[in-house]
C-alpha cells in the first residue's frame, strides 16, 4: 500500500530527500500511521515542527474556522489574525515588531537584508559582513546557504554570496578577532540543531551579546529550530537570559502550517519600509490563525513545565544507554531537543527503530536526534529506549 505512493514520489517528485519507503497518511498526538495502517511513535515531529503533536484539536479547529472565512488577501490591506499574532509574539518576546514570511530560510534572508539595511540607513553602507558559526545551519536559498558554515551543503552551488565570515562555534575569542569595521551582524543558533545538537557554554551567548554591544554590531538569533518550547523555554535565548536585536522563527510556529517570521526591536525594524521587503503569502490569515492557536497552547500555563520534566527524564534514560552501551558516546540536550552521539554511523539504528514503530532521525552521520512533540509521554519514551537499547546491542554484538 505504501508502495504505490513510493513509486509515484520516486517517478514525479524531485529527489531532494533520501526518503524512507513509507508514506505517512494520518497523525494524532505523538503517533503517525502509514498507508498500510502501521503506527509509529514520532520522535521527528516533521523536523521540529509538530510541537503540539499531530492534528492538535485547537489548531485543527482554528484552521477550519479561518478557511471558511478568509484564506488569503494581500498585505496591501490589514489582516486581522496577522495583527493579533504580531501582538502575541511581541508580548511574549523581546521584539517590538514582526515581519511575516513562509519558512525558515525566508526568515534568514529577511534577517540578512534587515541587518544590512539598518547600517545603510545609519550612513555605514560598507558594514555588510555577517559572522556565522562552523556547523551552523540556516537554510537552502542562496543567502542562507552562504550563511551556513558547513562545506557539504555548498558543493555544486558556488559561487556563494559574498559577505559571510565563518568562525568556530562556542569560541568567544574567535568572535572577538573576527569583528572589524565591515561587520554588521553576528548570526548564531543559540543551540545548534542540524550541526549536531551542540550546546554552547552558558557564558558564550552572553559573551556574544557583550561583544556586539561593545562594537555596535547587531546580534541575530536563529531560533527556527529552537523556538516555541523546543528547549523547554518558549525561546531558547531565555536559557541564557540574553536577548538579540533580531530573531528568525519558523518550523513550530504554525502548528504544522507553513509560516516564518522575523522578530526585531523597533530600532532595527524601522529600516524595513514600504518597498524594502515583502512576501506575497507572508502573514496570511490561514497560517496566522493556526499560529495563534498553537501559541495559545505552547505559551499556556504549565505546558512547558511538563515538557521540561519529561525532557529531564528522557535525557536521564539516554544517559543510561551511554553507561551501558559502548557504541553510545554521549547523551546531550535540553527540553525536547536531545541527541545521542554514537561511536559509529546511526543510519541502521534509524531503520531498525522504524521497523519497530519509532521514527527517529540521524544527523552528522553519527548523532541520533530526538525532537518529539512536546507532549510525548514517559511511557512512549520508555518504549523507545527499550527498542533503542536492543538495537544498539545488536550493533555491538556484530
Ligand atoms: C536553525 C535553522 N535555521 C533555518 C532553517 C531553514 O528552515 P526551512 O527549512 O523552513 O527553510 C532550519 C531548518 O532546519 C534550521 O534548523
Image (tube, rainbow, N blue to C red):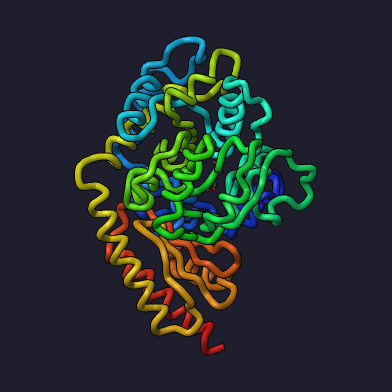
In this view, the residue in front, 164 or 223, is 164
- At 49% across and 60% down in the image, what residue appears? 198
Question: Can residue 272 be seen by looking at this rendering?
Answer: yes
Quadrant (top left, top right, bottom left, bottom right) of the N terminus:
bottom right
Location of residue 273 in the rendering, given as x and y in whole percent from the top left corner: 54, 15
Determine which quarter of the picture holds residue 227. Answer: top left
Viewer can see residue 52: no
Quarter, ligand 1: top right
Q: Residue 271: horizontal and vertical position, in percent?
A: 53, 20
| Nearest the eye: 324 or 91 | 91
Quarter of the C terminus within the rendering:
bottom right
Residue 369 or 68: which is nearer the viewer?
Answer: 369
Q: Is residue 183 above or below residue 226?
A: above
Q: Judge whether 30 appears above or below 282 on screen.
A: below
Q: Using the image, determine if residue 49 lies above or below residue 360.
A: above
Would residue 88 appear left or right of 398 to someone viewing this image? Answer: left
Residue 290, percent from left and from top: 38, 32
Give the residue at x 39% y 78%: 321
Amino acid at each position: 500500500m505504501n508502495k504505490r505512493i513510493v513509486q509515484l514520489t520516486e517517478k514525479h517528485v524531485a529527489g531532494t530527500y533520501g526518503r524512507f519507503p513509507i508514506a505517512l497518511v494520518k497523525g494524532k498526538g505523538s503517533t503517525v500511521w502509514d498507508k498500510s495502517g502501521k503506527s509509529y511513535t514520532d520522535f521527528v515531529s516533521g523536523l521540529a515542527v509538530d510541537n503540539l503533536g499531530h492534528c492538535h484539536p485547537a489548531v485543527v479547529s482554528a484552521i477550519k474556522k479561518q478557511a471558511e472565512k478568509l484564506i488569503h488577501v494581500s498585505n496591501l490591506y490589514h489582516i486581522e489574525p496577522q495583527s493579533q499574532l504580531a501582538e502575541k509574539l511581541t508580548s511574549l518576546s523581546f521584539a517590538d515588531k514582526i515581519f511575516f514570511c513562509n519558512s525558515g530560510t525566508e526568515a534568514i534572508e529577511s534577517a540578512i537584508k534587515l541587518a544590512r539595511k539598518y547600517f545603510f540607513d545609519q550612513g555605514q553602507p560598507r558594514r555588510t559582513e555577517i559572522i556565522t558559526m562552523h556547523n551552523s545551519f540556516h537554510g537552502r536559498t542562496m543567502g542562507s546557504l552562504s550563511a551556513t558554515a558547513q562545506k557539504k551543503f555548498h558543493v555544486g552551488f558556488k559561487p556563494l554570496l559574498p559577505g559571510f565570515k565563518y568562525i568556530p562555534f562556542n569560541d568567544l575569542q574567535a568572535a572577538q578577532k573576527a569583528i572589524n569595521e565591515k561587520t554588521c551582524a553576528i548570526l548564531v543558533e543559540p543551540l545548534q540543531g542540524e550541526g549536531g545538537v551542540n550546546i554552547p557554554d552558558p557564558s558564550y551567548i552572553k559573551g556574544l551579546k557583550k561583544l556586539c554591544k561593545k562594537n555596535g554590531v547587531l546580534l541575530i538569533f536563529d531560533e527556527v529550530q529552537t523556538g516555541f518550547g523546543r528547549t523547554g523555554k518558549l525561546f531558547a535565548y531565555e536559557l541564557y537570559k540574553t536577548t538579540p536585536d533580531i530573531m528568525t522563527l519558523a518550523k513550530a510556529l504554525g502548528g504544522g502550517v507553513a509560516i516564518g517570521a522575523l522578530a526585531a526591536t523597533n530600532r532595527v525594524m524601522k529600516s524595513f519600509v514600504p518597498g524594502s521587503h515583502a512576501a506575497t503569502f507572508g502573514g496570511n490569515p490561514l497560517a496566522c490563525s493556526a499560529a495563534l492557536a498553537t501559541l495559545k497552547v505552547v505559551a499556556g500555563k504549565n505546558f512547558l513545565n511538563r515538557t521540561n520534566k519529561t525532557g529531564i527524564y528522557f535525557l536521564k534514560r539516554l544517559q543510561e544507554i551511554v553507561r551501558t552501551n559502548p557504541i553510545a558516546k554521549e547523551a546531550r540536550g535540553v527540553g525536547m531537543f536531545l541527541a545521542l552521539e554514537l561511536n559509529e554511523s546511526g543510519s541502521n539504528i534509524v531503520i531498525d527503530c522504524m521497523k519497530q514503530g519509532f521514527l527517529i532521525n540521524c544527523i552528522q552521520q553519527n548523532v541520533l536526534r530526538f525532537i518529539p512533540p512536546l507532549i510525548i509521554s514517559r511511557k512512549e519514551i520508555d518504549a523507545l529506549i527499550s527498542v533503542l537499547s536492543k538495537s544498539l546491542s545488536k550493533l555491538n554484538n556484530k
